[in-house]
Amino acid sequence: MDQSYRSTKQIIEFTRELIPEGHRIKAFNREGDKPVLTQVSSRDELHDKIMSKVQDFQSREYNTIAIICKSAAESAAAYDALSVHGEIKLVQKGTNEYEQGVVVIPAYLAKGIEFDAVIIYDASMQTYGDESLRRLFYTACTRAMHDLQIYTVGEPSPFLQNDATDRLLLTLK
């Protein structure tokens, strides 16, 4: 399959730069905002920015918002930190139903699910620095239908240090 209908043209143009042969993927002509990459310096700042972005997405009446983490352990830690600020659900292995609203989910469980908006919890070099994680990162980013917000605590992943950055709005420090 070389035509993508899930995401906006801007999200597809960004994500196809993440994988080899991505140039073969054709974007459906549905316009939207460019994905945004925001660099923060601490977990506290990360959590504040994420909750602010969640409120922004909710004000736009998005019914499904995912905060996608690399692993189950990172998801549990993110959930613990973020759930004190609002109604958020944790999706884990064994979760039988997916409900609308705001969820924290590991990337490997997000495959096959689509969300109105996706927040990538931490796309830093420390989290996604290994080439073996490229497909997992691609999968996480392609879950977004309308909006994609990527955060990085410190230096961004090497996946974001190439032509893909031309397809992003950058808010790096």
Image (cartoon, rainbow, N blue to C red):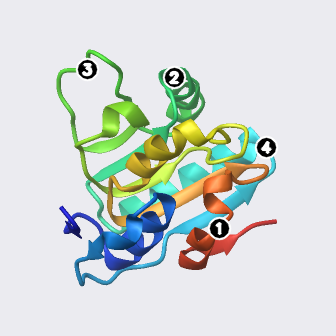
In the picture shown, does residue 164 fall above or below 100?
below
Residues marked 3 and 4 touching at CB (< 8 Å): no
Q: Residues within 10 Å of mark 4 (few under 14, many from 20)?
A: few
User: Would residue 31 be seen by someone viewing this image from the given angle?
Assistant: yes
Q: Which residue is mark 1?
A: 162
Q: Which residue is mark 2?
A: 76
Q: Earlier in the sequence, mark 2 or mark 4?
A: 4
Other residues around mark 1 within 10 Å, as few (<14) / some (14–19) / many (≥20): few
The answer for how far apart the CA atoms under marks 3 and 4 are is 30 Å
Q: Earlier in the sequence, mark 3 or mark 1?
A: 3
Q: Is residue 88 visible?
A: no
Of tags 4 and 1, the one toward the viewer is 1
Q: Are marks 4 and 1 in contact (CB under 8 Å)?
A: no
Residue depicted at 24% across the width and 44% down the height: 113
Residue at the disc numbered 4: 42
Q: Is residue 170 left or right of residue 84?
A: right
- Of the two numbered discs 4 and 1 on the same chain, state the one appearing first in sequence: 4
Give the alpha-carbon distance from disc 2 to disc 4, as whole Å. Answer: 18 Å
Residue 82 or residue 12, whichever sits in front: 12
Mark 2, other Cα within 10 Å: few <14 / some 14–19 / many ≥20: some
User: Which residue sits at x=62%, y=44%?
Assistant: 122
Q: Quadrant of residue 42?
A: top right
Which mark is drawn over residue 95?
3
Q: Is residue 75 above or below residue 150?
A: above
Residue at image x 48%, y 52%? 119
What element does badge 3 sit on?
A: loop
Amino acid found under the numbered disc labelled 2? Ala
Q: Amino acid at mark 3?
A: Thr
1 and 2 marks in contact (CB < 8 Å): no
N-term mark: 3 or 4? 4
Q: Is residue 71 left or right of residue 147?
A: right
Q: Who's the residue at 39% across and 72% down the image?
A: 23
